[in-house]
Amino acid sequence: MGVFDGRVVIVTGAARGLGRDYSRYFAQDGANVVLADIKDPRGAVDDASAAGTTCIGIECDVTDRIRVMEMIDRARAEFGRLDIFINNAGLGGGGSYQLGQLGLLDLPDEVWDGAWNVNVTGTLRCYQAAVPVMRENGFGGIINISSMAARSGGSPYGITKNTVEHMTRGMASEVGKDGITVNCIAPGICAFEAARTQIPNADNAFSGNAVKRMGTSRDLYAGMTYLCAEEASWMTGQTLHIDGGAAIS
């Protein structure tokens, strides 16, 4: 018996990387999963479906309100409910730019706007669309994704992720009465399963952590498992730092 038997989960940014792993883990734990991504998620859908639950893919740009509503409507039509929403879609770099490395003085407008549109506005629009469906059953768990970079105010990536953490508290305060929790996970340096051996100079990246290893998608999913469980229904508006102790270093 799976932890999430019969639950319906949407994961955005699910075509590859950590989102692809989360989708597979939820399916392995018994959930029916909607894998949404701006790119075609068919390969990730096949991967998740191997667990034996029903998994469907949807191409969705989270910055487009109409496409987000279509995603929610498709989930409701297919499964009749929505229980868990993982707001995983995010912009960590654009073209030749790396959002975590750019400063602010000479920041191009398109990079600033792109970071806000995906990381902040996209998260908000998905929340706005998901809550009415969750209210129908008086239960829901929404997980927003921040980053250890949220502690820095010197890059568009860090600034937008800090905003996501603040926004999470506002979201949680207005839907707690509906049986819906909204929490945030702030990962440290982590790798999805297929890339764990492909990151250069990985040892240096986490040498300052209390736990001397790179994080995994399983580490992050363990936090999601707790936050989305009925047993965690009194925990909301929190940011859970899963970072090997980077925040205390």
Image: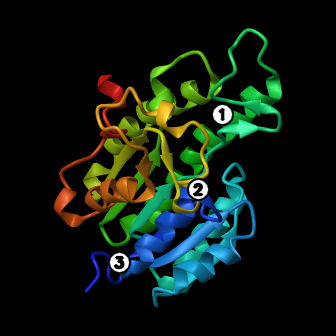
Sequence-wise, the earlier of marks 3 and 1 is 3
Camera-side residue of 15 and 5: 15
Question: Which callout, 3 or 2, points at the residue further toward the start of the chain?
Answer: 3
- Mark 3 or 2: the one toward you: 2
Query: Dot 2: few (<14), some (14–19), or many (≥20) neighbours within 10 Å?
Result: few
Q: Residue furthest bottom?
A: 52
Against 204, is 7 above or below? below
Disc 3 + disc 1, Cβ < 8 Å: no
Label 3 with label 2: CB-CB less than 8 Å:
no
Given residues 17 and 35, the one toward you in this image is 17
Left or right of 217? Residue 141 is left
Nearer to me, 170 or 32:
32
Quickly name the residue at label 2. 195
> Residue 62: x percent and y percent?
66, 53
CB within 8 Å, label 1 to label 2: no
Q: Is residue 9 above or below residue 209?
A: below
Residue in the image at 68% along x and 30% along y: 99
Q: Is residue 171 shown to the viewer in this render?
A: no
Residue 116 — which label?
Answer: 1
Above or below: residue 4 compared with residue 141: below
In this view of the protein, which residue sits in the foreground, 60 or 17? 17
**Residue bearing the label numbered 3:** 29
- Residue 201 screen position, x and y as percent: 57, 36
Tell me which residue sits at (50%, 76%) in the image. 33
Q: Amino acid at mark 1?
A: Trp
Identify which residue is drawn at 60% across, 73% down: 73
